[in-house]
Amino acid sequence: MTAAISAARAGAKVTLLEQNKQVGKKLLVTGNGRCNLTNRDQALSHYRGSSPAFIKSALKAFGLWETLEFFQGLGIVTRDRNGYLYPYSDQASAVADALRMEAEHQKVKLALNTRVQKIRKEKGRFFAETFGWTYEGDALILAAGSCAAAQTGSDGSGYVFAETMGHSLIKPLPALVQLRSKDPIFPKLKGLRTEAKVTLFSEKEPLAEDTGEVQFTEYGLSGIPVFQVSRYGVKALEQGKNLRAVLDLLPHMKKEELPSFWEDRIHAGAYKSAGQLLVGLFPKNMADCLLKRAEIPSNKTAGDLTREERKALLSACTSFEVKLSASNGFERAQVCCGGVDTREVNGKTMESMLVPKLYFAGELLDVDGACGGYNLQWAWTSGYLAGFYSAVDK
Ligand SMILES: Cc1cc2nc3c(=O)[nH]c(=O)nc-3n(C[C@H](O)[C@H](O)[C@H](O)COP(=O)(O)OP(=O)(O)OC[C@H]3O[C@@H](n4cnc5c(N)ncnc54)[C@H](O)[C@@H]3O)c2cc1C
């Protein structure tokens, strides 16, 4: 939609081909229905992909401020939550509506319920074949999304179109996704939420870490910090590596103060059982699990714990290890990592380096962002540039 608007504003006659009966269906589910549309912190480290230089170049051309100005022009002012920006009304539908209204205002023809089957280029013209009609144009923008959350329309067909045009793909994999484990603790801990630092390890190598509220579910781990590190874990699993998460369940305690905090706690609660010692730090079912990991009977008196047992219990709290076996897949992923290889795309214009006047935008490209509004920022950035340059002579 952003690409269609910027192309139309730059003077092109634009048709947007959408297989759903409405445009912007995925937008409606973003940010839990509130749409976290961008973020004030635009450090490049929040964006991932094979070519950081490509991402940097695009964000320099159309970044946060241009995005805010663009949305302000559509009537969307933002609400700031610690740098995470939402539409003031807190409704994702407002963003989808504002984009649709502007597209209509710019006379973009919205061809709904129109699934593109095939694309081709002949004698300098592009053709997009749908059931019953072939659309024709001087330029073509592929903005068909990834294959994450296919129920919203992005079923991976964009990848096929890109390959038809001779482009290479970095294998798309689920990212921002829950991680599964076969560890029998999970059914027991399901529903538990706790603050933790999550560090993923592939074999012995640390891959990524993040801190926040972790959710234990029937099948494994969820929550924002798990989403943030998931893409690295999914890649390691894809390579057949052993993947584990190490959870520090006391993430906000200073490491140097932890041993004395622990000894003081045990000393003051020497009359309690080992299980009671953990009351106030962790929910009961978590505490039971920690004692089991440390191989300490829950009724053992805290004052009788040996030095090794005290150390083992602290270590269970700060290095709670879980073996991971899979992700929840494309269906439950918020985005995909991988996509059209950006080494074959111009980072300023989003034009293909292989096929003149073919452009790419959004998640279809090998760019994925962390949770926090970065995936939509990438969609606005790449969409705006692709639209503009498809319509003007460079
Ligand atoms: C649950 C959820 C929550 C999210 N929350 C956030 C958030 O708060 N902040 C954030 O930054 N990101 C969020 N994201 C990610 C963000 O929504 C996507 O990265 C973004 O929508 C990608 O935009 P896109 O235009 O590339 O693809 P899409 O939004 O997927 O749009 C692609 C469109 O192309 C259409 N299409 C595909 N193939 C065809 C075809 N063959 N013919 C015709 N039409 C076709 C699809 O129907 C779809 O409408 C979330 C994602 C999910 C699933």
Image (cartoon, rainbow, N blue to C red):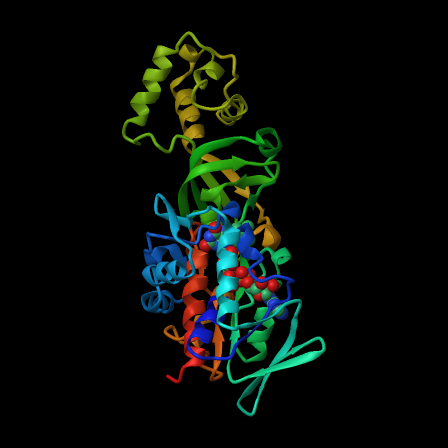
Regarding residue 232, the answer to whether it shows in the image is no
Where in the image, quadrant-wise, is ligand 1 located?
Answer: bottom right
- Please state, as top left, top right, bottom left or bottom right, where the C terminus lies in the image: bottom left
In which image quadrant can residue 259 be found? top left
Q: Position of residue 384 (x, y in %)?
A: 42, 69
| Residue extending farthest top | 271
Q: Does any portion of residue 314 appear in the rendered image?
A: yes
Q: Residue at x 39, y 10 (%)?
A: 270
For this rendering, which residue is in front, 56 or 190?
56
Can you say whether 191 is above or below 199 in the image? above
Residue located 40% across and 65% down the image:
381
Residue found at the far left of this picture: 256
**Horizontal and vertical percent position of residue 102:** 48, 65
Residue 258: x and y, percent? 32, 26
Q: Horizontally, is 205 left or right of 298 in the view? A: left
Image label count: 0
